[in-house]
Image: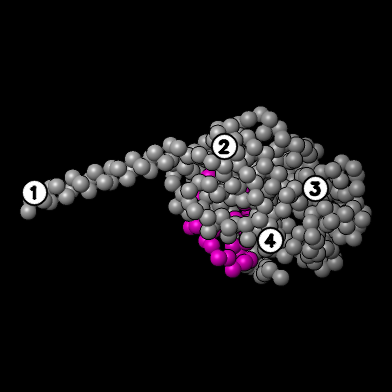
Amino acid sequence: MELYRRRFLRLAAGAAGSLAGARSAVAQAYPSRPITLIVPFPPGGPLDTVARIVADSMRGPLGQPIVIENVAGAAGTLGVARVARAAGDGYTIGAGFVGTHVMNGATYALQYDLLKDFEPISLMASNSWLIATRKSMPANDLMSFIAWLKANPDTASQGTVGVGSPHHVAGAFFQKQTGTRFQFVPYRGAAAAMQDLVAGRIELMIDSPTIVMPQVRGGTIKGYAVAASTRLAVAPDIPTVDEAGLPGFHVSSWSGLWAPRATPQDIVARLNSAVVAALTDATVRARLADVGMQVFPREQQTPQALRAHQQAEIEKWWPIIKAADIRPE
């Protein structure tokens, strides 16, 4: 009996070794065909732009092209669900941002778990938003504007890109931090909201430098503060909220890449290495800077850093969203 037992254990060990060897061989061969990167929004938007810039540069390190597939709808939930259902073989990955991988979890009944159903690959880029008002606003700085809002409750309107959007959530955060009240006006896009801000039909926007700075430079709107602890290179004369009297009102739109749950860690590591190589490239960094994006520091370009950042953002934004009772239409 002991002889049979030893023989069985040797065979089992051999089988396990063969299986591990097979997994290693598969990982070493990865990728052997093009990779699909799902962007959960239409072409041309901020996330799509960042994803295309980074994916194009990942081709060299991976030796295979990355094909962008835009799966838009339902505030990005359709595309993210597509990634969640995909095979964990490294051939389907997804791009996302604070809206899809943080805020949607507090506003939608999702068919996937934002933390458990995905393997983080890497953070990509971010941009700190600005607080801007119509040109005719009598206040000339942030604290004067807050005082005006308090003196005129429920009078002002903020342009957003929809209920539950990061713009809407940022506005709810602003109300909470300042004790002010104003209305939210949803638009089909930030460009349309900006048109109304320039025309003076709404009073306030909290949005990215790409949207805000051209109008500030043109003198058609007022830029009060950057919602961050450091000033922006593209707006060196605009103070931070900490400098302007509203410390801690930090709002940024950041993006990352995820793979489906159970994707082997050596494949995740291969993808992460390609992202890191892309974000090191001077041309990539310049292209991202041109659209108002800042690359995350090298120490934050790890799967673990993306997971920690996403978790911290959930802990920050979900209570704000729920306290404001923000629900999809």
Q: Of callouts 2 and 1, which one flags the residue occurring earlier in the amino acid sequence?
A: 1
Q: Of callouts 4 and 1, which one flags the residue occurring earlier in the amino acid sequence?
A: 1
Q: Secondary structure at mark 3?
A: helix
- Residue 189 percent coordinates (x, y): 79, 56
Residue at mark 2 to residue at mark 4: CA–CA distance: 28 Å
Most distant residue in the front direction:
33
Q: Amino acid at mark 3?
A: Ile
Q: Which residues are magenta?
A: 95-122
- Residues packed near mark 4 inside 10 Å, few (<14), some (14 to 19) or many (20 plus): few
Report the side of 85 relative to 71 (left or right). Answer: left
Q: Residue at x 64, y 37 (%)?
A: 56
Q: Of callouts 2 and 3, which one flags the residue occurring earlier in the amino acid sequence?
A: 2
Residue position for label 4: 73
Q: Nearer the viewer, mark 2 or mark 4?
A: 2
Number of callouts in the render? 4
Report the side of 83 relative to 236 (left or right). Answer: left
Q: Of callouts 2 and 4, which one flags the residue occurring earlier in the amino acid sequence?
A: 2
Q: Nearer the viewer, mark 3 or mark 1?
A: 1
Residue at mark 4 to residue at mark 1: CA–CA distance: 63 Å
- Residue 57 percent coordinates (x, y): 63, 35
Tag 2 near tag 3, CB within 8 Å: no
Residue position for label 1: 3
- Residue 44 percent coordinates (x, y): 75, 48
Q: Secondary structure at mark 2?
A: loop
- Residues packed near mark 2 inside 10 Å, few (<14), some (14 to 19) or many (20 plus): some
* Residue 142 appears in the rendering: no
Q: Secondary structure at mark 4?
A: loop
